[in-house]
Image (cartoon, rainbow, N blue to C red):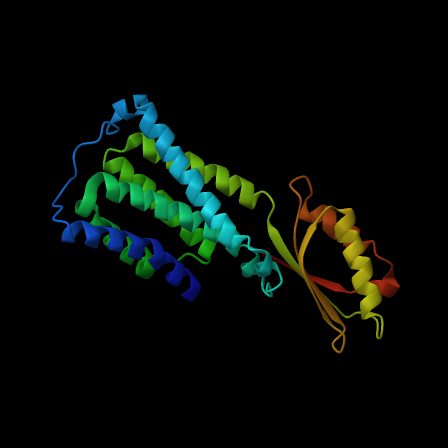
Amino acid sequence: MAMGGILLQLPVLAAASAIGQASFDGAQGNLAPSAALGWAGFLDLRFMAESLGILLLAAMLGAIIGFHPATKRRIDHLEEADMAHVFVMYAVIGAVIGVAVREYGTVVGVVVFGIGGLIRFRSSTDSTRDTVRLIIVTLAGLIAGLGLLPFAVMTTLFAFVLIYLFDSSPAYRIRIEGLPDGRTADCANVYRDVLKEQRCKIIAEHHSLGKGRIEFVFRLPRRRSRDHLDTSLRGIAPDLRGDVDWEVS
């Protein structure tokens, strides 16, 4: 919840900065009406192309930080495996807020802060990923209500594609306990080989030789199911097999 709260405040603070600057510059109320407002905005190809470019750039900038090579070596928990995706989504959220502020100026500031406070203190989402989706759909509704209908549709479709790309290969963590004494390393090799045979992308691996326990954080391919992988893990020879505990992101 703390991580979600911190991340949630980032796009709001970015909007606050833009709004504050506009106030110092003497901007009041709405900016000049945009040609992209209303249903006619779908015919404004320049605005559509520019908005799509902004979303793509924001996603790429978020990916540069989220998928930093050093991050992979520091993954210890399952939720950390999805943080790169969360960074990309928050970068997109920031871009959406930026376009709304650019089109409407300070008039959208109070609304953004109100929505931020509502989501921060009244939402009951269990994960940062769900919080991100809640913010996305709320902003899509907001910009639709403001009249930026093409951008609202584009934001929704863009988020839909990102969610499909990120969630079609979910992250799992398995903890294998009760391994034969003195054979933890051999068991780890066998379990690792099974995961690779099933084309799983191993993100992190941890051994506890003293406790006879190993852990793997990995992504399951789109065309593989958890049940199919679980069957393969149960097929490991009894002298190298332990008790598998699953956790899904």
* Image quadrant where one finds the C terminus: bottom right
Q: Is residue 148 left or right of residue 3?
A: left
Relative height, residue 111 to residue 53 (above, below): below
> Hey, which residue is sitting farthest bottom in the picture?
210
Give the quadrant of residue 155: top left
Give the quadrant of residue 47: top left
Q: Identify which residue is drawn at 75% across, 64% down.
A: 243
Q: Identify which residue is drawn at 44% across, 37% down.
A: 158
The one of 245 and 115 positioned closer to us in this rendering: 115
Q: Is residue 14 visible?
A: yes
Relative height, residue 58 to residue 120 (above, below): above
> So how many labels did they put on this image?
0
> Hey, which residue is sitting farthest front in the picture?
25
Q: Is residue 231 visible?
A: no
The image shows residue 79 at horizontal and vertical percentages of 54, 60
Q: Identify which residue is drawn at 51% across, 56% down.
A: 83
The image shows residue 97 at horizontal and vertical percentages of 31, 46
Q: Identify which residue is drawn at 30% across, 57% down.
A: 13
Q: Is residue 189 left or right of residue 167?
A: right
Q: Is residue 197 left or right of residue 14?
A: right
The one of 59 and 135 positioned closer to us in this rendering: 59
The image shows residue 109 at horizontal and vertical percentages of 21, 50
* Image quadrant where one finds the N terminus: bottom left
Relative height, residue 174 to residue 165 (above, below): below
The image shows residue 64 at horizontal and vertical percentages of 51, 50
